[in-house]
């Protein structure tokens, strides 16, 4: 192993790393705490023939029950910190959205309030152009520091190729740092807006259940994925230990000893019914890790 690279642990269960609580072992796992450690880990993984993925908080992720033949990274230390610099919020890729929001509020910086509804990290937000309540990462991001085994460099929002719940980043591209352009705002106003959004989220989403977040991207048109699946009669539909949420049909809950296979079965049925009733090909928002596919509708 290259000196000063973080130690690689083997056979760490993805069920312990993902918010849905499913998934088999990862071939290797590491928690780099500095940019140098991250860069060395990426090089070491390439030398071992290991593909790389970043797990973050484990939300928006569905891992194969048989395991994942990759090095899984969770950024730690300085790569998970955040600080304000005038109207910029500078965050490590592993900084949680909650930490970023607190730093922004304490500095009197607004514009990040929407992220209170997204249980993830700064890097994960960049990776998928995460969004909620009328805003997303593309609206506030200045640039992101992206590390690969071939080198590290800054990419602007336009270079990241943002579109709806999408960027040009792929597995092996690790967001090490993010710069957000925010605006001056009274901390009390920020606190009030966040409180309102949190209450709205709790009233409409299963925030106390084990889920991976939204299952499908919203299709074009006025009918969102959740409402469409509700009209298909899927609220409360169960397969094994997995359940389509009775509260919001675009969420799958781990109702007890669920497997990824159970979740996939629910997703397949949801896509089948949406196609049958509305002629829509729903596209999954959750990221697949390992050998996972959905049957064609």
Image (tube, grey):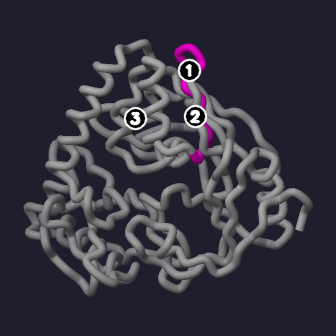
Q: Neighbour class for label 1 at 10 Å: few (<14), some, many (≥20)?
A: many
Q: Is residue 53 magenta?
A: no
Outermost residue toward the right in this view: 3
Q: Is residue 240 above or below residue 164?
A: below
Q: Main secondary structure of the magenta part?
A: strand
Q: Is residue 116 above or below residue 140?
A: below
Residue at 24% of width from left, 34% of height from top? 195
Residue 201 place in picture, x, y as percent: 22, 46
Dot 1 falls on a residue whose secondary structure is strand
Q: Nearer the viewer, mark 2 or mark 3?
A: 2
* Image mark for residue 82: 2
Residue at 61% of width from left, 58% of height from top? 74
Quote the CA–CA distance across marks 1 and 2: 11 Å
Residue 249 place in picture, x, y as percent: 18, 62
Q: To which residue does mark 3 refer?
A: 136
Quote the CA–CA distance across marks 2 and 3: 19 Å
Q: Is residue 53 above or below residue 293?
A: above
Residue 176 place in picture, x, y as percent: 67, 43
Q: To which residue does mark 1 refer?
A: 88
Residue at 45% of width from left, 41% of height from top? 97
> What range is drawn magenta here?
85-94
Q: Of label 3 and label 1, which has the lower sequence position?
A: 1
């Amino acid at each position: 192993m290259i000196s000063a690279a973080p130690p690689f642990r083997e056979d760490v269960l993805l069920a312990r790393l993902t918010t849905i609580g499913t998934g088999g072992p990862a071939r290797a796992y590491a928690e780099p705490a500095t940019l140098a450690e991250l860069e060395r880990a990426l090089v070491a993984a390439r030398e071992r023939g290991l593909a790389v993925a970043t797990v973050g908080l484990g939300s928006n992720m569905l891992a194969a029950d048989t395991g994942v033949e990759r090095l899984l990274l969770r950024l730690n230390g300085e790569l998970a910190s955040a600080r304000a610099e005038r109207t910029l919020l500078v965050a490590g890729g592993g900084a949680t959205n909650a930490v970023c929001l607190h730093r922004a509020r304490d500095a009197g910086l607004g514009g990040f309030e929407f992220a209170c509804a997204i249980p993830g990290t700064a890097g994960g937000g960049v990776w998928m152009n995460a969004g909620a309540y009328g805003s997303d990462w593309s609206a506030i991001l200045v640039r992101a520091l992206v590390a690969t085994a071939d080198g590290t460099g800054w990419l602007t929002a336009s270079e990241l190729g943002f579109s709806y719940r999408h960027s040009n980043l792929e597995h092996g591209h690790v967001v090490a740092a993010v710069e957000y352009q925010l605006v001056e705002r009274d901390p009390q106003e920020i606190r009030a807006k966040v409180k309102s959004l949190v209450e709205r989220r709790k009233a409409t989403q299963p925030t106390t259940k084990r889920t991976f977040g939204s299952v499908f991207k919203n299709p074009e048109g006025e009918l969102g994925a959740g409402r469409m699946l509700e009209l298909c009669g899927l609220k409360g539909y169960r397969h094994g230990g997995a359940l389509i949420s009775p509260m919001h049909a675009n969420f799958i809950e781990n109702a007890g000893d669920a497997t990824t296979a159970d979740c996939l079965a629910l997703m397949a049925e949801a896509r089948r019914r949406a196609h049958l009733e509305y002629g829509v090909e729903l596209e999954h928002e959750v990221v697949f890790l390992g050998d996972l596919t959905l049957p064609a509708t």
